[in-house]
Amino acid sequence: MKILLIEDNADDQFHARRELSGLGHTVIAASSGSEGLELYRSEHPDVVITDIYMTGMDGFALTRAVQALAAPRWQPVLFLSGHRDDELQVRALQVGADAYVVKPVSAEVLGAKLDVLQRLLRMQHQAESRAIELERYYRAEEEEKRIARHLMQRFVRGAELNDPAMRHWISAAAAFSGDIVAAQRTPDGALHVLLADGTGHGLAASINVLPVLAPFYRMSEKGYGIEAIARELNAKVKDFLPGDRFVAATLAAIDLRERVIGVWNGGNPEPVLIGPHGSRAFAMRHVPLGVMPDEEFDDTLDMHGFADGSQFFVYSDGLVEAENALGEAFGAERLAFALVAADSAGRFEALKAAVNHHLGAATPHDDISVLMVECQSPGEATFTPVGHGVPGAAVQRGSWRSTLRLTAAEIRHVDAVPLLLSLAGQFESVRHGTDRLFVILSELYNNALDHGLLRLDSSLKLHPDGMEAYLGARQASLAALTSGEIELELEQLAGPGQGWLRVSCRDSGPGFEHAGLDASAAGESELPFGRGLMLMRAMCAELRFNDDGNHVTATLQLDQHGNTS
Amino acid sequence: MEVNVATANGCAVLRLRGRFDFNAHREFREAIDNAIGQADAKEVQVDLGGVDYLDSSALGMLLMLRDRCKGANKAVSLANCRGAVKQVLDIANFSRLFQIV
């Protein structure tokens, strides 16, 4: 070791130097406290050996100065004293000396004490290098988390969640939330929401949950129903994740026009609909996503109608299980109370406040997520009637035509509308006009199915809970459908400086009495086509029925940029 | 969490006590290996009577057990599900996947 020796007596210094060199150490000597301090600064010795009583700066003052310079590290200091004095020794040890040796110095004693100091120095060095390594790992991990957080944010379409009809709150247990909340409007304005909770929490859970986002957005944008989306997400999760990982998820389709919510819930607590007439829970439960193989997957939806001014709440189990310092969970009762006690304007904030109040200073051990949708029917959509100059003799066939004919077996399983929509969207001429095309296709197809094949009674819809009863009957009839067919045809037509898209739908049902329909009849109509018909007349250049009423042809005008105008 | 495996009447019973969460991964896996390895046991049962807390990692571990039992051609069931444990299993609809006794 390199030793700094501070001793003002020349003989003592000589003697000590000789002993120390004999032990194999390098010695630098100073003859006064102040000289010693200078040398300490420049030489950085491993150990300082100092006399106590010196003129000028004494051993105590020197030690204090040296320790101040060395801080926060530890500088071993050994005192040399001519006095075998307990009180002096105690004082020396208290001021920062680590050992006390009485002059004249004996080689064995000095050597032994220096060995102790060397051992301690090695330990300090080890601890320091471990601390440095830990610091390095920590910084690397923080950087990785930063990148992952950045990626996660890119995946979730924040803009869709900022829809004025929604509020959401995510409180992550770690730096990452394993919960994901997403929303997407369908082409005809219905709202799809998703709340997914991956196994565990933190980065690993977030990664579990990512595979569900892209299919959810893509399929919703294309107009697929949430039964099909749930099935696809189940297959994705099952494929991507290991066998002991799954994703609890709630998918909901909120049709603001028809005032109905359809829910698929597997593994999350039941969503709640709370409105002017009280609250209802969507109690149908499925197994979480990623567990069932496709052939056993149950895509049955739970449907409820709602009155305007209702609010729909979806949340993860972290909310109900949030524990305060005493280990008490927030619980279903407190949740129900918080929702019911507040009025609709302040309900979301009241729920957040209740949870935070319950948690107190305790940190939640699981991610908390809540999504609320304001269920308010928009005013009647005003579509300005279009379509002047119905195609006449000058019209020719355009670039393409497509026909899709489905029989009962396929009608039960295939979502025909998004299929055709995505086909049509491939063509330049139609690319930007798919919104209106979606509405037309849906109206035609659903009417053909509901009234042509399933023979459902639309008057059901008029009663307060009618929508639910109607949809329940529809689900049952569809599952039991064994015969019948629907044929959809899309064709692009061209005229002088004009383009058209012709959509036709033919079903194998008996048709209906269309002759007496008056386009100017406002409000709900008892006839099967009713409001949908009004919508279609507003959007199409021409709408034609065959005599029986089971073959409808709608013609949309395409403007120069391929928009259906 | 403590896990205890005992075989009687052709059924290997895994008796669990304590918190069933991600920390229990290793003990549970060893217990599964043990239970499945018992040639004369045609059935595996998980006794959750002593479990006071169950989280989603535990559900995942139960799913793993179910897969392993299917592969080994053994029946599997869950027993003595009470309170908070029963609640979690209900919410996840696990009665569709396991026989619950």
Image (cartoon, coloured by chain):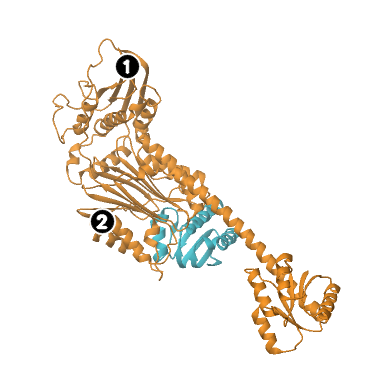
Chain colours: A orange, B cyan
Q: Position of residue B68 (x, y in %)?
A: 55, 53
Residue at coordinates 31% horizontally, 35% vertically from top-left? A481
What distance separates the C-alpha of mark 2 from that of mark 1? 54 Å
Residue at coordinates 23% horizontally, 28% vertically from top-left? A536
Q: Which residue is mark 1?
A: A493
Are the numbered discs 2 and 1 placed on the same chain, yes or no? yes
- Position of B6 compared to A279: left or right? right
Q: Which residue is mark 2?
A: A346
Mark 2, secondary structure of its residue: loop
Q: Quadrant of residue A353?
A: bottom left
Chain holding disc 2: A
Q: Is residue A382 above or below residue A53?
A: above
Q: Say which amino acid is labelled 2.
A: Gly
Q: Say which amino acid is labelled 1.
A: Leu
Q: Nearer the viewer, residue A195 or A289?
A: A195
Q: Position of residue A430 (x, y in %)?
A: 35, 24
Residue at coordinates 37% horizontally, 42% vertically from top-left? A159
Q: Position of residue A527 (x, y in %)?
A: 17, 32
- Position of A525 compared to A20: left or right? left
